[in-house]
């Protein structure tokens, strides 16, 4: 059923979501999983700013960057952008879980 | 009222308008003939005449994506292309109008491949006619300059917020010098206020522009864009009036008529070939023929009402299409089908005949216009239509 056009936000523009959308989980689309080699990582966080789905979590004082695999589609942009080759893409079939 | 008349090409005139509009972001990628606009703008930026971010795109798809982002971030943005460059960027046009970002793209027409011969042909820009952008053709360098200013103002109006294709015929306008009255910065500042959108990308108030939607939201989203296009008609009229008051050049937003008073036969066309048509019509008038020219200035939104009221005054209308539309209804071009659709359900019986002419950058010669007129004159005399459309010159 179509929603009344007056109720649709102008040009479909919406506030950035503050929580995860459980109705649109996209992690199962992934065929390759990003894996970080923390030894090589130089902490530039280009991967974080490049991810089109906001699936790279910023590093903290105690942890390097992490990936939100619930939504990561495995596009590989992070690995492509990494200037030191610290991110590799591993086929999902290599993992048991 | 003349302030600063110079001789310049359509490309340089457009570049001057872009400078006067004080754009923030320009994205270029070379292809003839529009590229003359970008070389002039690059010079202006390098010489410090224009303070703008000048970005080199990696192709036309990239070009449109750059200005898309720039406009979403609140910048007044400008880009352009020609021929296959225009079609290469096709994917990005609908998102830009759907997200209501009023950036401007100049198109100096070039034929698609084949023949890819650099020549002018309206096919490139007309391929994009239904993407929710404003679109029209300038027929002189002066009009090209004015159109850039007019379109920014119309497109950025809060009731509209739509992007614009400011089109000019390749070479016939883009590379031929004409007298151009260059307005002062004060005039332009009075006419064109700074760009403000009601959704701007801002880290302090994060939002998603172009979010993926559920199918139930689709119809309403498209209807919003349709309403925006419908709003454009009123804004076109208002803005052209105001333009006339400030700059002293009063254009009819939709149609330019030439020697149409008491005319029985007219040529209906858009762009620079109207200049040749006018010369021929002037000569035919001297020979006593009742003939005129109606030039369409705005193609999107299509001025249905104005075209209907205008064309129904005549008996035979020769519609000259400068584009290819293979397999189209009536076998000619999109201008013919739109003119016929505008006239349909109308009491008057107007005969409309299509001509496909000037393809691949060739001139539509005076002789060809005389031959087209002979066909139209015969139809007016006998009332019989043997063929709905003709390819010039092969079928004349």
Image: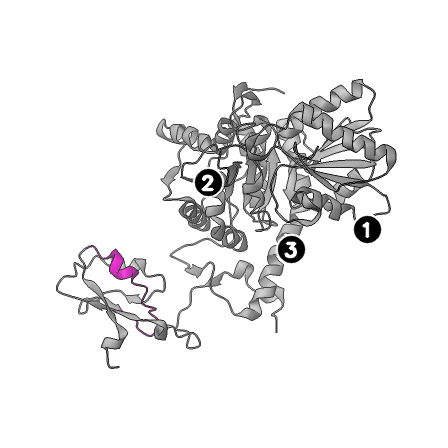
Q: Picture quarter containing residue A88?
A: bottom left
**Disc with the residue nearer the chain's start (2 vs 3):** 2
- Is B281 covered by the magenta stretch? no
Q: Are marks 2 and 1 on the same chain?
A: yes
| Real-space CA distance between mark 2 and mark 1, rounded to the nearest whole angstrom | 40 Å
- Which residue position holds label 3? B227
Please report, as a chain letter, where disc 1 is located.
Answer: B
Question: In the rendered view, does A15 fall on the left or right side of A10?
Answer: left
* Quarter of the figure with the N terminus of chain B: top right
Q: Name the residue under label 1.
A: B345
> Of discs 3 and 1, which sits in the foreground?
1
Check disc 3 and report its element: helix, strand or loop.
Answer: helix
- Circle 1 SS class: loop
Neighbour tally class for label 1: few under 14, some 14-19, many 20 plus, Cα within 10 Å:
few
Marks 3 and 1 share the same chain: yes
Magenta-colored span: A67-83
**Mark 2 lies on residue:** B79
Residue B149 visible in the displayed image:
no
Res. A94 image quadrant: bottom left
Label 3 chain ID: B
């Amino acid at each position: 059923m179509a929603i009344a056009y007056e109720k649709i936000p102008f040009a479909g523009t919406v506030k950035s979501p503050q929580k995860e959308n459980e109705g649109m989980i996209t992690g199962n689309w992934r065929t390759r999983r990003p894996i970080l080699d923390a030894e090589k990582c130089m902490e530039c966080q280009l991967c974080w700013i490049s991810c089109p789905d906001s699936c790279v979590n910023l590093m903290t004082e105690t942890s390097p960057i992490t990936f939100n695999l619930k939504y990561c589609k495995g596009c590989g942009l992070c690995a492509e952008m990494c200037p030191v080759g610290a991110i590799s893409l591993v086929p999902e079939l290599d993992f048991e879980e | 009222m003349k302030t600063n008349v110079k001789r310049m090409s359509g490309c340089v005139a457009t570049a001057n308008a872009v400078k006067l509009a004080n754009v923030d972001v320009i994205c270029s990628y070379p292809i003839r003939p529009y590229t003359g606009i970008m070389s002039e703008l690059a010079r202006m930026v390098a010489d410090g005449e224009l303070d703008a971010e000048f970005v080199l795109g990696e192709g036309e798809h990239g070009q449109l994506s750059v200005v898309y982002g720039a406009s979403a971030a609140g910048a007044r943005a400008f880009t352009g292309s020609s021929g296959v460059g225009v079609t290469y960027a096709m994917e990005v046009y609908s998102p830009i109008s759907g997200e209501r970002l009023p950036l401007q793209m100049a198109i100096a027409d070039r034929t698609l491949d084949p023949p890819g011969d650099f020549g002018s042909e309206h096919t490139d820009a007309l391929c994009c006619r239904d993407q929710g952008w404003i679109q029209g053709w300038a027929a002189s360098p002066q009009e090209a300059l004015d159109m850039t200013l007019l379109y920014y103002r119309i497109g950025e109006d809060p009731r509209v917020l739509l992007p614009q294709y400011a089109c000019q015929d390749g070479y016939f306008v883009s590379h031929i010098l004409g007298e151009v009255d260059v307005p002062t910065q004060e005039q332009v500042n009075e006419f064109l206020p700074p760009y403000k959108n009601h959704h701007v990308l801002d880290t302090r108030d994060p939002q998603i522009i172009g979010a993926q939607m559920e199918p139930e939201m689709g119809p309403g989203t498209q209807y919003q864009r349709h309403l925006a296009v419908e709003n454009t008609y009123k804004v076109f009229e208002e803005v052209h009036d105001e333009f006339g008051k400030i700059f002293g050049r009063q254009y009819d937003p939709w149609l330019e008529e030439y020697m149409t008073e008491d005319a029985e036969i007219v040529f209906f066309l858009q762009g620079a070939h109207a200049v040749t048509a006018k010369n021929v019509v002037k000569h035919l008038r001297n020979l006593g023929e009742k003939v005129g020219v109606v030039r369409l200035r705005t193609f999107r939104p299509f001025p249905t009402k104005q075209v209907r009221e205008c064309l129904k005054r005549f008996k035979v209308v020769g519609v000259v299409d400068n584009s290819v539309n293979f397999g189209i209804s009536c076998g000619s071009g999109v201008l013919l089908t739109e003119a016929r659709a505008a006239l349909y359900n109308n009491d008057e019986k107007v005969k409309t005949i299509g001509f496909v002419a000037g393809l691949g950058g060739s001139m539509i010669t005076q002789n060809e216009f005389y031959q087209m007129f002979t066909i139209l004159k015969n139809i007016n005399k006998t009332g019989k239509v043997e063929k709905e459309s003709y390819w010039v010159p092969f079928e004349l």
